[in-house]
Amino acid sequence: MPEPVKLDILAIAAHPDDVEITCGGTLIKMAKMGRSVGVLDLTAGEMGTLGDRTDRAEEATAAAEVMGLAYRTNLGFPDSAVLVSQKNRLAIAEVIRATQPEMVLLPHWEQRHPDHRICSELGYDACFLAGLKKLDLPGEPFRPRKIAYVSYFRNDRHTFLVDISDYFEQKCEAVRAYHSQFGNPVTAKHIFQPGLDIFDLMKTRGGQLGQLVGVQYAEGFSLKELMLVDDPQHLPVRSI
Ligand SMILES: [Zn+2]
């Protein structure tokens, strides 16, 4: 595990390349704003049809550099067999204590891949447990203030959208770092049903969300709690 650093934002995902595809633009934007941004991948993605554990690890490191991450680590849980267990909750809670992120990004709970759905649940549980003073776990008790759920293309209701227009190309570059997955345009089409090119998918989805709020590209997020507004008159996005 790399030396822990104090983070502003920690994105937790099941497989290397999940964060790049779903919220890479937002992570790049936050890093450019001077925030300390980290990623925790739960598995090495070894069950993917293309590439192996070593390829994916090297590609994740290269993508981290493109995104300007301050921290990235991998817990090595078995791919496609991520389970809700106290052992797994505590492994994630230990990273949360070590990096103390104010905000945690988790996969949205509506998912096609079971690892993504379980990562969402494990991540929430770990945020809660990390704050328990009597928990037998290394590090100081710490609980993130905010959890936002990242859209994985499955859900179409979002609490807020982030404008990533200026960072869309860089997001594509981070995804392109996964040569084993997306380097060959023929085999890459087998990863996302129904035979979609990942870059076309990100462009279509990002563009569609962007259009809803008057920008070129956006990424979608959900909250489980309500948002509190101080000044309703200056809410962004035109109504008419
Ligand atoms: Zn995944």
Image (cartoon, rainbow, N blue to C red):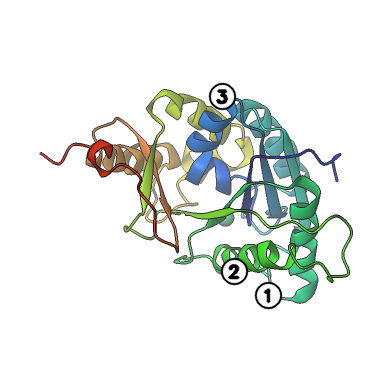
Amino acid carrying label 1: it is: Val
Whichever of callouts 2 and 3 sits on the residue coming sooner in the sequence is 3
Using the rendered image of the protein, determine whether residue 176 is visible from the camera's viewpoint: no
Using the rendered image of the protein, determine whether residue 162 is visible from the camera's viewpoint: yes
Q: Residues within 10 Å of mark 1 (few under 14, many from 20)?
A: some
Whichever of callouts 2 and 1 sits on the residue coming sooner in the sequence is 1
Q: Residue at x 64, y 54 (%)?
A: 144
User: Residue 108: x and y, percent?
Assistant: 48, 60
Circles 2 and 1 in contact, beta carbons < 8 Å: yes
Q: Residues within 10 Å of mark 2 (few under 14, many from 20)?
A: some
Task: Identify residue for label 1.
Answer: 84
Task: Identify the element where label 2 is drawn.
Answer: helix
Instruction: Name the image quarter holding the C terminus.
Output: top left
Which residue is farthest bottom?
85
Task: Identify residue for label 2.
Answer: 121
Q: Residue at x 28, y 31 (%)?
A: 215
Q: Quadrant of ligand 1?
A: bottom right
Q: Residue at x 35, y 54 (%)?
A: 158
User: Residue 126: x and y, percent?
Assistant: 70, 65
Task: Identify residue for label 3.
Answer: 32
CA separation in Å, label 1 and label 3: 34 Å
The mark found on residue 136 in the picture is none
Task: Identify the element where label 1 is drawn.
Answer: loop
CA separation in Å, label 2 and label 3: 29 Å
| 174 vs 154: above or below | above
User: Residue 231: x and y, percent?
Assistant: 30, 41
| 216 vs 74: above or below | above
Whichever of callouts 1 and 3 sits on the residue coming sooner in the sequence is 3
Amino acid carrying label 3: it is: Lys
Q: Is residue 202 left or right of residue 66?
A: left
Q: Residues within 10 Å of mark 3 (few under 14, many from 20)?
A: some
